[in-house]
Image (cartoon, rainbow, N blue to C red):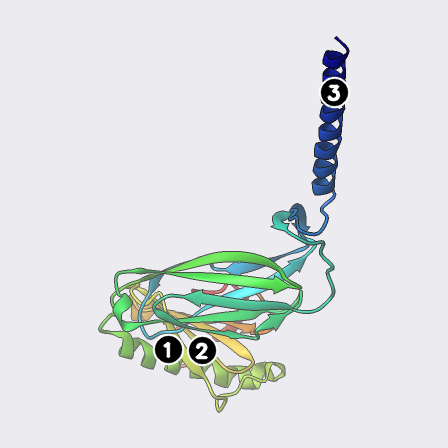
C-alpha cells in the first residue's frame, strides 16, 4: 500500500514539474526573446498620391507622366505588419516605379510633402492592344506605401505627325503672347521643349503636352470648324504644382487679329 502511495506521489510531482516547464516556455515565447519572431500592426505615417491612376488612350513611343506627391499624417490611415519597432525621421520619401514592356524613369527620385515627382512611362512597340500596369512605391525610412496605375495602349493614329506640327504652331502663338504679357513666368519661345501626344485618338478636340526643365504646358484646340477654332493652354510648375496654376485661351486661331486672354485653369492635368 505504501509503495502505491509513493508511486502516485512521484507521478504527481512529475506532473507539477512538467506543467511549470511548459508555462515557462510559453511565457518566454510571448515575451519575444531571441529566436522568436513577433509581428505588430503599425500605422503608416504617410501616403503617396498618384494622378491619374488610369490612362485610357495611350500609344507606343510617347511619354506618359504620372504625378506623385506625399502626404504625412494622412487621415486615411493605412496599416502594415513589421517585425521591429519603427523610428520615423524627417528624410525624403524615395519614389520608385516598375512596369513591364515599358521604359520607366523618375524625377526627382526623392520628395517631401509639397513637392511633385514625375513617373514617366514610354510603352514598347509590342504593347499595342494591351494594358500596362505601373507599380509606384514611396519608401520612407523603410515604410512603404504603394499605388497601382494602368495604361491602355491603342493604335497610333496616322495623323500623329500632323497633330504634332499643329500643336507646336499653337504653342508658339501662346508663348509669344506670354513673353509680352506674363514675363514673370519666364516661358520663352527659345526654351528647349519636348512634346508628347495625349488623347491621340480624339476626333474633334486635339491635345498635346510640352515640357521644359521647369514647366509643363498643355495645349488643346478645336478642329471641327474654322469659325470656332479656339485653343487653350495651361501651365504647371513641374516640381511644385500638382495641378495647373494658370490657363489661357485664343478665341480663334485663324482670326486676322488673334485675341488671347486668361481663363480659369482646369482642375486637373490632361493625360
Query: As rendered, which of 254 and 164 lies closer to the eye?
Result: 164
Q: In the drawing, what numbered circle is on residue 266?
A: none
- Against 255, residue 140 (above or below) is above
Ranked by sequence position, the earlier of labels 2 and 3 is 3
* Mark 3, residue position: 12
Residue drawn 67% across the image and 49% down it: 43
Question: As displayed, is residue 191 above or below residue 22?
Answer: below
Q: Position of residue 162 (x, y in %)?
A: 27, 78
Crowding at label 2, few (<14), some or many (≥20) Cα neighbours within 10 Å? some
Determine whether label 1 and label 2 are within 8 Å by CB: yes
Answer left or right for 95 relative to 4.
left
Label 2 and label 3: CA atoms lie apart by 86 Å
Residue 56 locus on image (x, y percent): 35, 58
Q: Quadrant of residue 202?
A: bottom left
Which quarter of the figure is the N terminus placed in? Answer: top right
Q: CA distance from mark 1 to mark 2?
A: 9 Å
Report the front residue among 57 and 68: 68
Indicate the secondary structure of the residue bearing disc 3: helix
**In the rendered image of this protein, does residue 188 appear above or below residue 249?**
below
Distance from the alpha carbon under mark 3 to that under mark 1:
93 Å
Percent coordinates x, y for residue 63 in the rendering: 40, 73
Q: Which mark is residue 210?
A: 2
Dot 1 surroundings within 10 Å: few (below 14), some, or many (20 or more)?
many
The secondary structure type at the circle numbered 2 is strand
Q: Is residue 205 visible?
A: yes
* Labels 3, 1: front one: 3
Residue behind mark 1:
167
Q: Residue furthest top?
A: 1
Amino acid at each position: 500500500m505504501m509503495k502505491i502511495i509513493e508511486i502516485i506521489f512521484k507521478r504527481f510531482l512529475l506532473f507539477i514539474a512538467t506543467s511549470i516547464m511548459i508555462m515557462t516556455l510559453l511565457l518566454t515565447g510571448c515575451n519575444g526573446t531571441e529566436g522568436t519572431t513577433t509581428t505588430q500592426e503599425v500605422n503608416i505615417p504617410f501616403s503617396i498620391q498618384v494622378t491619374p491612376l488610369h490612362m485610357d488612350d495611350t500609344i507606343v513611343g510617347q511619354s506618359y507622366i504620372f504625378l506623385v506627391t506625399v502626404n504625412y499624417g494622412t487621415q486615411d490611415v493605412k496599416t502594415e505588419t513589421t517585425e521591429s519597432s519603427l523610428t520615423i525621421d524627417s528624410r525624403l520619401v524615395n519614389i520608385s516605379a516598375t512596369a513591364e514592356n515599358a521604359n520607366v524613369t523618375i524625377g526627382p527620385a526623392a520628395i517631401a510633402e509639397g513637392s511633385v515627382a514625375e513617373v514617366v512611362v514610354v510603352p514598347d512597340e509590342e504593347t499595342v492592344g494591351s494594358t500596362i500596369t505601373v507599380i509606384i512605391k514611396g519608401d520612407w525610412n523603410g515604410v512603404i506605401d504603394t499605388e497601382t496605375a494602368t495604361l491602355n495602349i491603342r493604335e497610333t493614329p496616322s495623323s500623329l505627325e500632323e497633330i504634332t506640327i499643329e500643336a507646336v504652331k499653337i504653342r508658339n502663338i501662346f508663348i509669344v503672347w506670354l513673353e509680352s504679357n506674363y514675363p514673370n513666368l519666364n516661358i520663352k519661345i527659345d526654351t528647349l521643349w519636348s512634346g508628347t501626344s495625349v488623347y491621340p485618338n480624339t476626333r474633334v478636340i486635339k491635345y498635346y503636352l510640352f515640357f521644359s526643365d521647369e514647366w509643363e504646358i498643355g495645349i488643346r484646340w478645336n478642329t471641327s470648324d474654322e469659325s470656332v477654332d479656339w485653343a487653350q493652354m495651361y501651365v504647371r510648375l513641374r516640381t511644385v504644382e500638382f495641378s495647373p496654376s494658370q490657363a489661357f485661351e485664343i478665341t480663334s486661331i485663324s482670326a486676322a487679329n488673334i485675341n488671347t486672354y486668361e481663363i480659369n485653369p482646369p482642375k486637373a492635368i490632361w493625360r
